[in-house]
Image (tube, coloured by chain):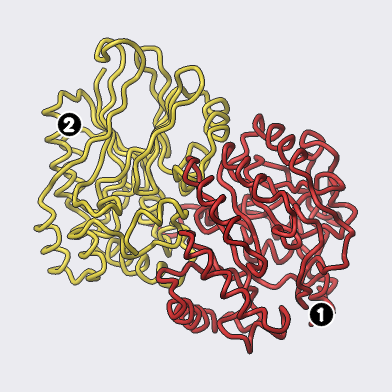
Amino acid sequence: MSTSTESPAIELQALDELWFQVSGTLCNLECTHCFISCSPHNDSFGYLSLGEVERRLEESVPFGVKEYYFTGGEPFLNKELVPMLAATLEYGPATVLTNATVLKPQWLRELRAAEERSLYSLEFRVSIDGPSAEMNDPIRGERTFERAMQGVQLLVEHGFLPIITMTRTWDEADDVTILDQFRDVLRGRGYTRPRLKVLPRLQIGAEAQRTQGYADHDVVTHEMLRDYDQSQLICAHSRVVTDRGIYVCPILLDSPAALMGDTLNEATAPFALQRGACYTCYQYGAICTNPSSHVVEQQRGGENDL
Amino acid sequence: MHFAVFGGLYNNYLALQAAIDDACRAGAEALYCLGDMGAFGPYPDRVFPLLRDHRVICIQGNYDNSIGNGLADCQCGYTDPRDNYFAKLSYDYTYANTSMENRRWLRDLPSEHRMEIDGARFLMCHGSPRKTNEFLWESTTSTQFLEKLADDFGADVILATHTGIHWRRELSGGRQFANVGVLGRPENDGRNVVWYALIRTGRDVAGAGIDIQFVPLEYDHQRLAREMRDESLPEEFVTTILTGWWTTCLEVLPSKERRRGQF
């Protein structure tokens, strides 16, 4: 029985999303806000193999996994990513989180064909941190805005509708203006129905150096969870396959306590919300899933007497 | 048995009347509605007498929960500011034009309906059996997920709505999932029709099992468009009724469903 001084533990309600940390912490970029400090040299987590992904897909079926997500690092550094995604589309919908700077037309042709064969959607989430090189490049690196926009154009030419995902490094009140600007820029590049998603900053990893880490009081308490819909928390419905085993969520890879076990069965234990990043997840809810799977907290009735 | 299941009505009382007539002509012995009576269309109070007079068995959608309990928004789960802008316009109009009596009726609707017919366990819900406002799109819902829902909730047939586009998946052991579509607006396919489901079981099925047919329904959409303009509802909504293409609330669509539309 937990006491009020311990961190609250969140049960895995259902394994709705299975993530693959498919290129580990290896990335061709070195973004200054990366919450797991990915870089060309950070091999603290390594690549997954096609065989490992296929084994985990099969393992995931009895859990009723609804969707699969692929992240890194930069997933396309893994040379087996295209067959991995094609294999996944036989099990369910797949989403890949990419910086879109290393895409090749041949891969996109194969992936488009795989999606056409499948019942399910293949989504690309492309990270670009603002509608201009002036906003994006200081964070993601020189010329990365232009390179990523070329990647977006390539995706659009191949019939995909990428979701441009940006980390909010501006005031939240400016969201509408920035989203409008970004839509105009994307339309100017031939992406006529741009899809956009804004993510909150996670003040861990490189971001803790760029700005600041979490304060001691940035924690989720038992009281905060009273009348709170826990399905808003990623750990209530996700787990992540890495080359070191199953972790609780794609954000907390640097936390030893987030390693849940070697098998999905071992990884179903409740998870204690001890980290500052858990506080951001609590505040914003469902930050890692796609808009099509976003479920808002259901409110209780009876606020107004009729 | 032979029965009809309607999805979200979105105030479209003209489509509801047409669907009731169509289902009765087809021989339906019972009528069901899976919730979201309000939104989008004109004159919210006009669907309620039809539902009551024709003894339509109704369950509560997220919209009904919101209107019934006087909540601030529709709990639809839109993530985009433009989508939320249109959702709020629609919600405020519907709330202001739903009588107190009808709000109470919405508040008291059950969140699911279960029944056993000819040996099959039916579970009717709004979004999913586990959550009223969960979107179950065809291209983002794996088969193993549906199998687990059927196991966990002890159902042979699960019927839902909420997304606005009909689809069906066969599961193991003859079980099925169906999203029955909605009567409220067309399906983002460039056609003016709206959709509902006719379901036959037992002796009403040639052979065995459960037969689910999706029915495209014509109704007086020109009149609906005129009345929406009379009520100063957004021209974007009117365009959807007249063209069959969605113009708002598009950001929640997965890519396969989004690609099929024009916007």
Tag 2 residue: B23
Q: Colour of chain A?
A: red
Q: Quadrant of the N terminus of chain B?
A: top left
- The amino acid at mark 2 is Ala
Marks 2/1: CA–CA distance: 62 Å
* Rendering coords of residue A88 (x, y %): 62, 42
Q: Which mark is residue A212?
A: 1
**How many residues crowd around disc 1 within 10 Å: few (fewer than 14), some, or many (20 or more)?**
few
Q: Quadrant of residue A220?
A: bottom right
Q: Is residue B167 left or right of residue A208?
A: left
Residue B89 screen position, x and y as percent: 32, 69
Circle 1 chain: A
**Quadrant location of residue A245?**
top right
Report how many numbered discs are placed on residues in the image. 2
Is B228 drawn above or below residue A115 in the view shown? below
Q: Which corner quadrant holds the C terminus of chain B?
A: bottom left
- Residue A297 makes an appearance in the image: no
Q: Amino acid at mark 1?
A: Gln
Disc 1 is placed on an element classified as loop
**Does the rendering let one see residue A294?**
yes
Q: Residue at x 15, y 26 (%)?
A: B26
- Describe residue A69's horizontal placement relative to residue A259 as left or right: left
In the picture as drawn, the residue positioned furthest to the front comes out as: A106
In the image, what residue occupies the spot 65% across and 32% down? A61
Residue A95, above or below A126: above
- Please give the letter of the chain rendered in yellow: B
Q: Chain of mark 2?
A: B
